Amino acid sequence: MNMTKRLAVIGTTAAAVAATTLAMAPTASADSYNGCGYPRVCFYLTVSNWNNASYTAAYQDVTTSYQNLGANSRGADKVHNTRNDDRAYLRYVVDSTGATQYLCLPPNHTATFPAGNTVTGIRIDTASSC
């Protein structure tokens, strides 16, 4: 076999091996849960929304201050954080006293707000532990 044909065969073989390796490479690991896709923090206004895996609002931007929640997230019964490395701080009001309190929601965890607590804000932070 002459040198040009040999190089062509080697190049074709190398390209085929590279394509096979790329096709078999693992995909990035990301967690989704209960209808909430990575990398979001999802709000479920009602237990029915939660049971049907139908979130009503989602946030994903890291911020330095709290974002006020809109009509589809304010007062949610459940909040789930699908982020793998970021915690979410949730601001809520205790209705009976009017006191504002804060909850740290670790990555891949769910918070449940009982009747009488109204979640009003979110801040996503780049640290993973609370």
Image (cartoon, helix red, strand yellow):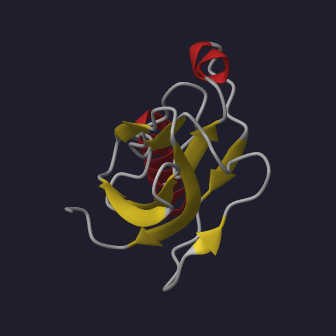
Placement of 74 over or under 130, stated as above or below: above
* Percent of width and height locating residue 105: 34, 52
Residue at 53%, 50% in the rendered image:
95
Residue at 47%, 40% in the rendered image:
80
Image quarter in which the C terminus is found: bottom left
User: What is the tally of numbered marks visible in this picture?
Assistant: 0
Q: Nearer the viewer, residue 102 or 72?
A: 102
* Percent of width and height locating residue 71: 80, 51
Left or right: 110 in relation to 45: left
Q: Quadrant of residue 61?
A: bottom right
**In the current view of this chain or complex, which residue is farthest to the left?**
129
Residue at 68%, 48% in the rendered image:
73
Left or right: 60 in relation to 21: right
**In the current view of this chain or complex, which residue is farthest to the front?**
97
Placement of 101 over or under 19, stated as above or below: below
* Percent of width and height locating residue 82: 45, 44
Q: Nearer the viewer, residue 7 or 101?
A: 101
Q: Quadrant of residue 59?
A: bottom right
Left or right: 57 in relation to 8: right
